[in-house]
Image (spheres, rainbow, N blue to C red):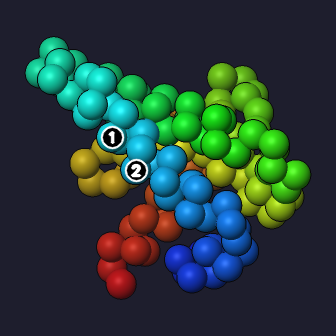
Amino acid sequence: MKMLSKEEVEKELGSIFPILCNCILKGLEDYVTDLGHLGWKFETHTKASIIRDQIVARVKADLIGFSNVSIFDQNGLFFLNVNEKFLIRFKKFKPNFLTSNFPTHQQRLIDWQFEDLRFK
């Protein structure tokens, strides 16, 4: 699996790219605005789950109706399919930027991408 540069992803996703970036930023802002003052009550993994859910809610609201986008949940997992080329999930990461999932082949590829980015 080839890892794409930010520029390649931006080109491939076209008008979807800035919308996704905005969803991520606004999802984080939603957490800070709505629940940030309660952060001391939440465990770190709870905060990460809330932020991820805020991002997913934004993506569902902002990308519905795009002809080149399909959004679906399968087995409790959220997926965003763009141009039949990108299957995007929003994951929570540990402080070392690795995920804490069962190490499936897909998960190892995701972890490898982050390991590779840290050494560039």
Residue under pointer 1: 29
Instruction: Calculate the distance from the C-alpha at mark 2 to the C-alpha at mark 1.
Output: 6 Å
Secondary structure under tag 1 reads helix
Q: Find residue 45 and report its horizontal and vertical position in percent.
A: 31, 28
Q: Is residue 78 left or right of residue 101?
A: right
Residue at horizontal 42%, vertical 44%? 26
- Seen in the picture, residue 57 relative to 29 is either above or below; the reply is above
The quarter in which the N terminus is drawn is: bottom right
Q: Is residue 72 left or right of residue 27?
A: right
- Viewer-proximal residue, 55 or 85? 55
- Seen in the picture, residue 24 relative to 11 is either above or below; the reply is above
**Circle 1 crowding by C-alpha within 10 Å: few under 14, some 14–19, many from 20:** some
Task: Residue at the far top: name it.
Answer: 41
- Viewer-proximal residue, 107 or 8? 8
Q: Is residue 100 left or right of residue 67?
A: left
Q: Find residue 42 and report its horizontal and vertical position in percent.
A: 21, 19
Is residue 26 visible in this depiction of the protein? yes
How many numbered marks have been drawn onto this rendered protein structure? 2
Tag 1: residue type?
Glu
Is residue 2 visible in this depiction of the protein? no
Residue at horizontal 34%, vertical 54%? 97
Residue at horizontal 56%, vertical 49%? 107
Residue under pointer 2: 25
Q: Find residue 46 and report its horizontal and vertical position in percent.
A: 32, 23
